[in-house]
Image (tube, grey):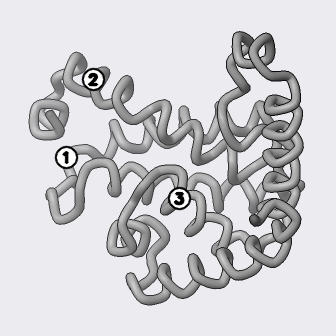
Amino acid sequence: MAVAAALGDRVAFETIVHRYGPLLYGYVRRMISDCDAVDDVVQETFIAAWRQIHNYRGDAALKTWLFRICDRKIVDSRRVRYAEPIDDRLLDPINPSAAAQDPAVVVSITEFLAALERALAELPVRQRACWVLREIDALTFPQIGVTLKMSPGAARGHHHRAQVTLRQRMQRWQR
């Protein structure tokens, strides 16, 4: 698909956008709080990817390559304006039919997600990025390392520190 896009195949690139756009959007949404900036960063990521697709060598997975571009765009966005702590939902909203089944469960999940959101917002940016990429987007430590321009060991260390901090801050929710 990347090869066809590099040769100018717009349909192949549209397939890339449709496949990876939601993942990138979710990542950016968790990394910056300005909703307008989220859309801009994702759009800028794909514009940069389209312009650079001929440079994609396949050393890393296409997904990782896109996340790396995206991470640079997030940094660029932060340079323009300082980011505020995230205030969007970590996960998709709860299914309304679940509320009809057990309102107590829905309230508990909502409270948990709000607490997790606050705890994530307090993490240093690199720790938050490593945690989100690992736990939400299911990237491996080598992929995270490539994405964030750090060694896999550094990615693992940031992720570990994030986990320790989150575990402490989320103690109320542990059984």
In the image, residue 1 above or below residue 124: above
Q: Which residue is mark 2?
A: 15
Task: Please give the residue where the numbered disc 1 appears in the rendered image.
Answer: 54
Residue closest to the eye, 119 or 62: 119
Q: Position of residue 131 (x, y in %)?
A: 59, 66
Look at 72% across and 25% down and name the residue there. Answer: 94
The CA span between labels 2 and 1 is 16 Å
**Residue found 66% across the figure and 30% down from its top:** 92
Please name the amino acid that badge 3 sits on.
Answer: Glu
Residue at x 81% of width, y 52% of height: 117
For residue 154, side relative to residue 1 (left or right): right
Examine the rendered structure and indicate whether residue 165 appears above or below residue 20: below
Badge number at residue 135: 3
Q: Residues within 10 Å of mark 1 (few under 14, many from 20)?
A: some
Locate the N terminus by quadrant. Answer: top left
The local secondary structure at tag 3 comes to helix
